[in-house]
Image (tube, rainbow, N blue to C red):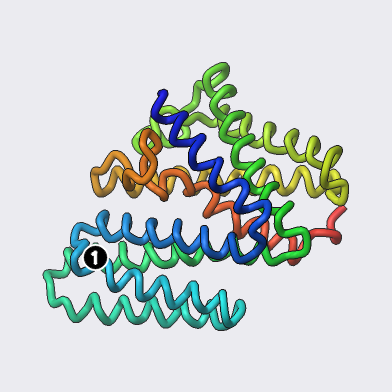
């Protein structure tokens, strides 16, 4: 526990000042580092790191550079072309069918999951009040996780997906949603008064739901390949994917809501 707390303190002491004072560039650099580590973890998970690493970094780097220098359209085109590149390189391996399919599935999943979702963190930061929206994403994820933990311990009876995550319950999920909504109403009353009541409810529910999906998806992946943690970048916390699964899945929800629904609903 002491190691876990110390590593979290060190990480936060570096990240928080960078996010507050470093502007968009700091977020782009931090996200690039985290996503690069995530791709390396996927290369290890795929079971053939020596051959996986350069393909994943090349494909993921192309997608990330697309969003940095070319905007949404080029980023999506880069994602498609990178997936095609991985498909062709997987076919060229000439392994048995089962091995080739597993390798290809993990490779494409790595780029789409890690980079395709993660690049939305940069897109969120580029929005008007982007720093505040990033803060809202983190507040939702933390509140939902805390609410789910306490509600699950107090009222948890019905398992959500016992084979993948034995401790998660439906009661915990609903408790996490409620905690996220309450947290957003607190945000609304303090530093982001532009939020409406509808925004608080809709964002709290849907972002916390996708955070749960992200957590379950990562747990399912680890059980499928029989690993305890995706990596060991933070002592006591596991790998980059272990720490960012909920954030990666929640970022697109924030981005799509702000660009399509914020100021329209409520």
**Residue visible at 39% across and 56% down in the picture:** 38
Q: Say which quarter of the image contains residue 138.
A: top right
Left/right of residue 247 with respect to residue 132 in the rendered view: left
In the displayed orientation, state which residue is furthest to the top. Answer: 154
Q: Nearer the viewer, residue 107 or 166?
A: 107
Residue 74, x across and y down, in percent: 55, 83
Placement of 156 over or under 81, stated as above or below: above
Residue 92, x across and y down, in percent: 19, 81
Q: Say which quarter of the image contains residue 122.
A: bottom right
Q: Say which quarter of the image contains residue 188.
A: top right
Q: How many marks?
A: 1
Label 1 packing within 10 angstroms: few (<14), some (14-19), many (20+): many
Q: Nearer the viewer, residue 52 or 87?
A: 52
**Residue visible at 18% across and 65% down in the picture:** 50
Q: Secondary structure at mark 1?
A: helix
Residue 10, x across and y down, in percent: 49, 38
Can you identify the residue that label 1 sits on?
A: 103
Left/right of residue 206 with respect to residue 89 in the rendered view: right
Residue 139, x across and y down, in percent: 66, 41
Placement of 157 over or under 42, stated as above or below: above
Q: Quadrant of the N terminus?
A: top left
**Residue visible at 72% across and 65% down in the picture:** 127
Q: Nearer the viewer, residue 25 or 50?
A: 25
**Residue visible at 47% across and 31% down in the picture:** 168
């Amino acid at each position: 526990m002491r190691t876990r707390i110390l590593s979290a303190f060190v990480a936060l002491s570096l990240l928080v000042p960078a996010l507050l004072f470093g502007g968009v560039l700091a977020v782009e650099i931090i996200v690039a580092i985290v996503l690069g580590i995530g791709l390396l973890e996927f290369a290890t998970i795929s079971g053939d790191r020596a051959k996986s690493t350069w393909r994943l970094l090349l494909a993921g780097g192309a997608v990330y550079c697309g969003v940095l220098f070319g905007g949404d359209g080029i980023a999506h085109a880069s994602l498609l072309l990178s997936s095609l590149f991985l498909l062709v390189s997987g076919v060229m391996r000439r392994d048995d069918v089962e091995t080739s399919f597993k390798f290809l599935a993990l490779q494409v999943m790595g780029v789409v999951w890690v980079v395709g979702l993660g690049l939305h963190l940069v897109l969120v930061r580029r929005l008007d009040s982007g720093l505040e929206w990033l803060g809202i994403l983190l507040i939702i994820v933390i509140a939902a996780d805390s609410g789910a933990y306490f509600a699950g311990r107090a009222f948890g009876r019905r398992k959500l997906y016992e084979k993948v995550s034995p401790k998660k319950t439906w009661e915990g999920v609903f408790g996490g949603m409620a905690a996220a909504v309450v947290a957003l109403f607190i945000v609304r009353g303090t530093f982001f008064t532009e939020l409406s009541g509808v925004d608080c409810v809709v964002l709290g529910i849907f972002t916390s739901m996708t955070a749960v999906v992200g957590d379950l998806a990562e747990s399912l992946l680890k059980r499928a390949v029989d690993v305890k943690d995706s990596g060991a970048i933070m002592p006591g916390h596991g790998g980059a994917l272990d720490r960012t699964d909920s954030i990666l899945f929640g970022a697109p929800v924030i981005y799509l809501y702000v660009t399509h629904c914020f100021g329209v609903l409520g």
